[in-house]
Image (cartoon, grey):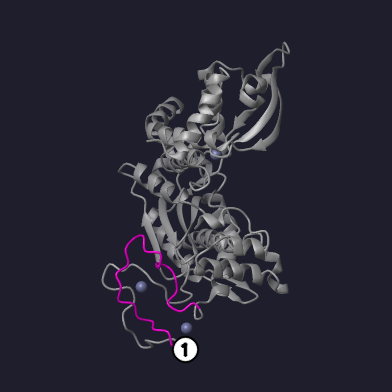
Amino acid sequence: MLDEEDTQMLFAVGRQARARRLDDFLSQGARCGWCAHPIRLRGYVLNKVDGRVVFASYRFPGNVVLKACGSRSELWCPSCATLYRGDARHLVRAGLEGGKGMDVSIAAHPAVFLTLTAPGFGVVHRQSSTGPCQSPHASARCPHGRTLICQARHGQDDPALGTPLCARCFDYAGAVLHNAHSAELWRRTTIYVARHLAASLGLSRAEGAKVLRLEHAKVAEFQRRGLVHFHAVVRADGPDATSAPIDAHALAAACRTAARLVEVSHARGSARWGTELDVQVVQRDGPLTPVASYVAKYATKEPAMHPGLLGRILSERDLQARDLPPHLFNLVATAWALDAVPDLSELGLRRHAHHLGYSGHFLTKSRGYSTTFSALRDARAEWQRQRDGEADESATTRRLRAVGRGWANEGEALFAAAQARQRAEDKKEADFAWHTRCE
Ligand SMILES: [Zn+2]
Ligand SMILES: [Zn+2]
Ligand SMILES: [Zn+2]
């Protein structure tokens, strides 16, 4: 039996079929990868040489051509997020083993995989491999009379995970300010590592910079407790694309030292890394794909911790309407409130309240690490143009303007979502074809 969604979908597709536009509709959807929230463009593209119209929106239903939204959020657009995930994997991998324009000799350069976490800001429910959530310790009750013992063994999907045993004890301001300073903390960490390595070679900072350069790709991820932590690949290069004059173990030791020492002072104290630090030498004699996939997995984890945190918070009323669980609500409300404190106002906490104070990007890389997202996108667009027999972009003049966003109606949106799901299943094969072609 058809449910209401099926009926709406059939109605939308039937309408295109009656208008003899079903093929156009399907081609319109395929062009944007059945994006959930496509940008609607109207206009045409001309061949620069002979002025011929090579592409026009009127050829498509509704006189619009649809452009993918490009989101990396699985919650917002599964189709674009899938594409992003593949690109992130290629990007990280190219920096470890070469390819995509990177010399393959970098595969021999020392590299480490580093995980930096935030310190504790209060006792939270957690998963423990050794026993229950929180075992009895010295102060079994907090000053508010709440028990700090939890005998539960929380399952993977338990919504209690990461939430504090006593919300009044949890240092929300400290947590938000850690998030707000974590990008700067990372920047300083890389400087410390380089300085430390130079010193270990008996060189000054300036001399060290001539023989050793650190390149990295890093991903930010929220832990359930709402604190950002980083996973990064750090690679050491020498001058003129040679390998660095240190080995990976020295690099790992320098990362450990830097992570312990670095701090960022702010109006309410200082931000430092937590003690949970993980530094692993990237083995150069085995396949590297697992490391790249590992980083890419983090790179593409849902950035929003909750559907209610998609998009900026616009007002206190907007925040109330987001329907957030209490712990996330407290974090966002704290970021919102701290923005009004004069010596914290330059942090832009309201602008970043939906990211719990974190103002950085979720995947960043240093310039020399590997190829870029835009180079990967250009290569894909070029591949698609060649496949579709279309003109090179430099040979055309684009006269397209945005006239809206999304699908024409609920039925089309549902149909697009179903197509996107199907595509995700076919994706592995297509991704392989593209990757092999661009190698
Ligand atoms: Zn999209
Ligand atoms: Zn618990
Ligand atoms: Zn308490």
Instruction: Indicate left or right for 357 with 155 as reference.
Output: right
Pick the residue in front: 171 or 424: 424
Q: SS of the residue at dot 1?
A: loop
Q: Amino acid at mark 1?
A: Pro
Q: Is residue 435 magenta?
A: no
Which residue does the image show at 42% across and 73% down from the upper left? 124
Task: Please give the range of residues in magenta.
Answer: 143-167
Q: Residue 87: x percent and y percent?
A: 48, 39
* Ligand 3 within 8 angstroms of badge 1 C-beta: yes
Does 29 appear above or below 388?
below
Mark yes or no: residue 280 visible.
yes
Residue where numbered disc 1 is placed: 143
Task: Indicate the position of residue 215 as horizontal and vertical percent values.
Answer: 51, 49
Report whether 436 appears left or right of 180: left
Q: Nearer the viewer, residue 108 or 326?
A: 326
Residue sitting at x 42%, y 77%: 165
Dominant secondary structure of the residues highlighted in magenta in the image:
loop
Residue at the farthest top position: 50
**Position of residue 364 measured from the top left corner of the image (x, y, whole percent):** 54, 50
Q: Is residue 155 magenta?
A: yes
Q: Is residue 358 above or below residue 390?
A: below
Q: Is 150 situated above or below 398?
A: below
**What residue lies at 60% left-to-right and 69% top-to-bottom?**
333
Q: Quadrant of the N terminus?
A: top left
Q: Report the side of 191 relative to 156 (left or right).
A: right
User: How far from the left and from the top, in percent, is residue 421?
Assistant: 42, 37
Q: Is residue 376 visible?
A: no
Question: In this orientation, which residue lies closer to the viewer: 228 or 93?
Answer: 228
Q: Give the side of residue 205 with respect to residue 288, left or right.
A: right
Residue lying at 42% horizontally and 71% vertically, measured from the top left = 275
Residue located farthest toward the left when viewing the structure as drawn: 130
Q: Which class describes the residues within 10 Å of circle 1: few (<14), some (14-19), or many (20+)?
A: few
